[in-house]
Image: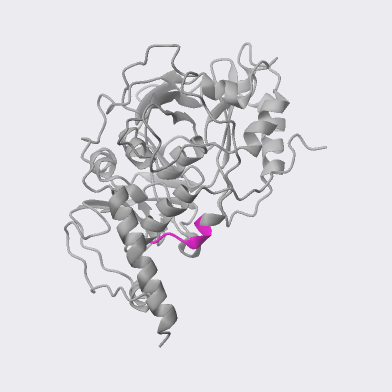
Amino acid sequence: MTLINKILSVSLHSVSLYLLVVIFVLFSGCQTIPLSYFSASRLPIAPQTKSQHQAQSPRMPLATHEFTFDATHDDVIGRLQVIQAKEEDTLSDIARRFNLGLEEILHANPNVDPWLPGEGTPVIIPTEFVLPNVPREGVVINLAAMRLFYFPKAKSSKSQKVITHPVGIGRVEWKTPEGLTKITTKEANPSWIPPESIRKEHAANGDPLPAIVKPGPDNPMGTHVLRLGWPSYAIHGTNKPPSIGLRGSHGCLRMYPEDIKQIFKEIPVGTPVRIVNQPRLLGWRDHTLYLQVYPTLEDDKRNHNTLLNASLTRMPTTQKAKLIDRKRIKINMALLREATLNPRGVAIPVSNSNITLQKHIDSATPTLNILPFNANWDGDNNRHLTATEVIHHINEKSKQNSQKLNNPN
């Protein structure tokens, strides 16, 4: 008998999510988003009420991209937060405000309308992270989480700094490779030379590309690029910020403009880059064991029940598990199964015996819905789409599709 029941796969998408992804497809440029995105499972969770998170006074938000932790003791950083949506908010607005990717905030809030959350609606901010289970040095990118972690060289063996940001990754047919490489060059205001394969694809779709896309607002590489040791792959910015946190590129890793600008300054040439795909993450914080579960990528065919069972079996023998008060912890199997069946990307304390998934989410720290102190972003929403623009462009796309059907030649 395995420790975990087989994952259920249920396709339960809201009309709002469909429209959200459709409009990103329309404006993705070279950063297209596959129709296979629509097959992602989203299991229903009991809706939150507006009173559940109002018992405490909200805290001032702090920047959610830079943390310091005890590398010899802990694997978990940040904290789970909850804010109340403003009347004009979309989940895309809130995601960028708190340095999250689109899928991160959608999975954490499966019953919240992405376009019209509604004033006062609680929105979970999943800014507590279990670090990937790899050497914590240089750049580490977890494809399942669509998140980058940068570990600068530590000044002591104990205190470790980590900088983390959401990323966009390659779509299924242009998947981002896994493995170990390094930063080979850095370039500000880059030109983009589209490979012949990408130019052919765009030409076939009626959207021809020039041989060279010069620096500027139409350049999909944005303002900064960190080139990798793998030819044709890079970490770069974007001219379409709402696409961050989706599978939409031709294999490169995209970041918010404000994030790539800052991390460009931090990361030196020669820094190792390790890309992994870990949708289920186990890690310690104080005397508690956490599990963070992300939806598996649609082309990931591994048996993650078996992999998690193996990780749980090895856990008691690890150095961190042997620390005082950790040897006697017991896994809350009901909570573990619930977290696995409902992959919300929220770090869950699975060694806590008296808690459910919803009870843990209800314990999120109430936080003011304002730009965090020391955030990279300045709050400029100019590149976000309005609901009016969404409706207009969906109508235009429908007209184009109808014309193609009526005039196949």
Q: Is residue 35 covered in magenta? A: yes
Pick whichever, 326 or 205, lies toward us.
205
Above or below residue 54? Residue 129 is below
Q: Which residues are magenta?
A: 32-37
Q: Residue at x 59, y 18 (%)?
A: 288
Q: Position of residue 137 (x, y in %)?
A: 42, 36
> Is 126 above or below relative to 288?
below
4 with respect to 25 (left or right): right
Closer-to-camera residue (128/131): 128
Tell me if residue 272 is in the magenta stretch: no
x, y (%) of residue 92?
A: 36, 42
Kindly indicate the quadrant of the structure image that contains residue 28. Answer: bottom left
Q: Is residue 80 left or right of residue 240?
A: right
**Residue at horizontal 53%, vertical 21%?**
362
Residue at screen point 37% across, 56% down: 24
- The quarter in which the C terminus is drawn is bottom left
Dividing the picture into quadrants, the one containing residue 310 is: top right
Foreground pick, 238 / 22: 22
Q: Is residue 332 left or right of residue 408?
A: right
Residue at horizontal 40 percent and vertical 84 percent from the top: 407
Q: Nearer the viewer, residue 257 or 309?
A: 257
Residue 152 occupies quadrant: top left
Instruction: Please identify the quadrant where the N terminus is shown.
Output: top right
